[in-house]
Amino acid sequence: AEAVGAIKSTLEEMQTLAQQIKDGDLTYSADVAAEYETLDNRITSIIEGTQYNGISLLDKAKWGTDQISSAGNVYVQSLPDGGFDVTFRDLNAVDWEGDLVGTDLGAAGTLQTQLDTLSGFIGDMDTLAETYSGRAAGLEYQATALESQADLLDQAVAARRQTPTKSLEEILLDLLLRD
């Protein structure tokens, strides 16, 4: 979600440059085109560098491993007998360098195309950021539930040491009734 936010922020910087040219607040030049291209390259760097535990999350070129499938799925084991997939979107599938071209800021027709393209990408990043934030909230909820279960089991182990004659079921029932 943070990487997608950084991409969105970069796209907004690019949009600001293009809008300033359109509004006449900034004159198109090779330097402005180079700045635009530098921002475009930052997006590619963010995509290539976004990793968690060595898993590349947004760059499909690095998928197809034991940790992440070629479809961008990461399996999360949440129970002893099951789990679920978290799916990531391949952001290097977008032709960032082909769609966002600094020299296109120099002509009125292509300038508007750049603004439209940027607007669409920003909307996509908003949607994707919301999706990832929602997933994070869901995973945090599951983590809290699992921590609670682990705490209960830790208490059961401690109680078992104190009264080794009780069965595990009796110990768990005592703990549940106590809580």
Image: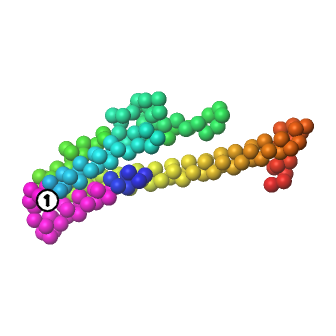
Find out whether residue 159 is within the magenta segment: no
Residue 137 falls left or right of residue 124: right
Q: Residue furthest front?
A: 162
State the residue in front, 31 or 132: 31
List the single residue furthest toward the right.
165
Residue 60 figure quarter: top left
Query: Where does the image place residue 22, in percent across and percent down from the top left?
Result: 15, 64
Q: Residue at x 62, y 34 (%)?
A: 82
Q: Quick check: 106 left or right of 161?
A: left
Q: Position of residue 178 (x, y in %)?
A: 84, 53
Comparing 78 with 171, the one in front is 171
Residue positioned 88% across, 38% down in the render: 164
> Is the residue 38 above or below the residue 24 in the image?
above
Q: Classify mark 1: helix, strand or loop.
A: helix
Would you say 156 lies left or right of 166 here?
A: left
Location of the C terminus by quadrant is bottom right
Q: From what the image shows, is residue 18 above or below residue 171?
A: below
* Res 79 quadrant in image: top right
Is residue 110 in view from this perspective? no
**What amino acid is at disc 1?**
Val
Q: Quadrant of residue 21?
A: bottom left
Residue 15 vs residue 65, the one in the foreground: 65
Q: Which residues are magenta?
A: 8-33
Check residue 11 for magenta coloring.
Answer: yes
Q: Which residue bears the numbered disc 1?
A: 32
Residue at 27 percent of width and 50 percent of height:
42
User: How many numbered marks have been drawn onto this rendered protein structure?
Assistant: 1
Is 122 situated left or right of 140 in this image? left
**Does the magenta stretch mainly form a helix, a strand or a loop?**
helix
Choose between 149 and 123: the one closer to the eye: 149
> Where residue 140 appears, x then y in whole percent?
57, 51
- Image location of residue 128, percent across then percent down: 40, 50
